[in-house]
Image: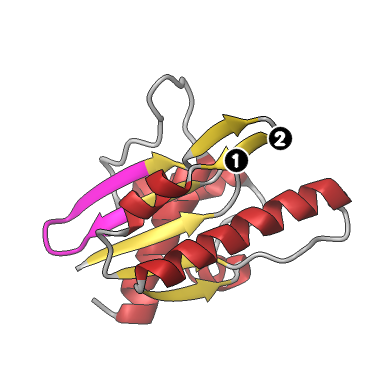
Amino acid sequence: MIITGIDVGFSGGICTLDVERNIVALYKMPVVKSDAGNELDYRALYSIINVSDFICVEKQHSMPKNGVKQSFNFGGQYYSIRAIIRISDKKSEYITPQRWKKYLLQSMDKSNKGSSIERAKQIYPYINLIPDGCRKEHDGLADAFLIAWYAKQYILGV
C-alpha cells in the first residue's frame, strides 16, 4: 500500500510512503513559473499521486492575519489539489493540522517548524529532508511525511 501525505503551499511538500517496502519518497511541491507568478504544476502532482492507494491532505482555511492575495493563492492551490485527487479517483481524507499534530507532536512545540523535522527523524531516522539544490532541511517535507505517517497509523491502521 502506498500512502501519500500532502502539506499544501508553494513551500509545502509531498511524501509517498510505501508501507510494504518501508520506502519514503519526498518531493517539494511541484511549482512552475507563469505570467501570474508561481503556479502548481498539475501534471507533476498528478504523476506523483497517481501511484497512491490513499492520499491524506492537510486541510486549509483562511486565516485572519493572512492578506487577501495570500488567502486567494493558498485557497486556489488547495482546491486545485482537491480537484486533481478527485480526477485521479483515489481514496483520500483531509485533516486539520491540529488533528495530526495532536498525536505526532504531543510533547513538542506545535508552532515551531523545527518540531516537525525533529519528529520525522525520530520516526524514520534515515529520512533526508534536504531537497536537491538546498542546504537546509525543509519543514514542508517533514510535515508531508508526518501527514502520511498519521494516515498510516491513525486513519488506516496499517
* Residue 107 visible: yes
- Mark 2 lies on a secondary structure that is loop
Q: Nearer the viewer, residue 155 or 50?
A: 50
Residue at horizontal 36 percent and vertical 45 percent from the top:
121
Q: Nearer the viewer, residue 108 or 52?
A: 52
**Residue 39: which disc?**
1
Q: Is residue 150 left or right of residue 112?
A: left
Residue at horizontal 62 percent and vertical 69 percent from the top:
98
The overriding secondary structure of the stretch rendered in magenta is: strand
Q: Residues within 10 Å of mark 2 (few under 14, many from 20)?
A: few
**Residue 36: which disc?**
2
| Quadrant of the drawing holding the C terminus | bottom left
- Queried whether the magenta region covers residue 19, the answer comes back as yes
**Residue 49: which disc?**
none
What colour scheme was applied to this rendering of the protein?
A: secondary structure
Q: Residues within 10 Å of mark 1 (few under 14, many from 20)?
A: some
Residue farthest along the left direction in this orientation? 21
What's the magenta region? Answer: 16-26
| Quadrant of the drawing holding the N terminus | bottom left
What is the CA distance from the residue labelled 2 to the residue labelled 1? 8 Å
* Residue 106 visible: no
Does the CB distance between marks 2 and 1 fall below 8 Å?
A: yes
User: Where's residue 124, x and y in %?
Assistant: 29, 50
Residue at horizontal 81 percent and vertical 60 percent from the top:
63
Above or below, 10 against 79 in this view is above
Q: Nearer the viewer, residue 72 or 141?
A: 72
Above or below, 81 against 40 in this view is below
User: Where's residue 10, x and y in %?
Assistant: 59, 42
Amino acid at dot 2: Ala
Residue farthest along the front direction in this orientation? 35
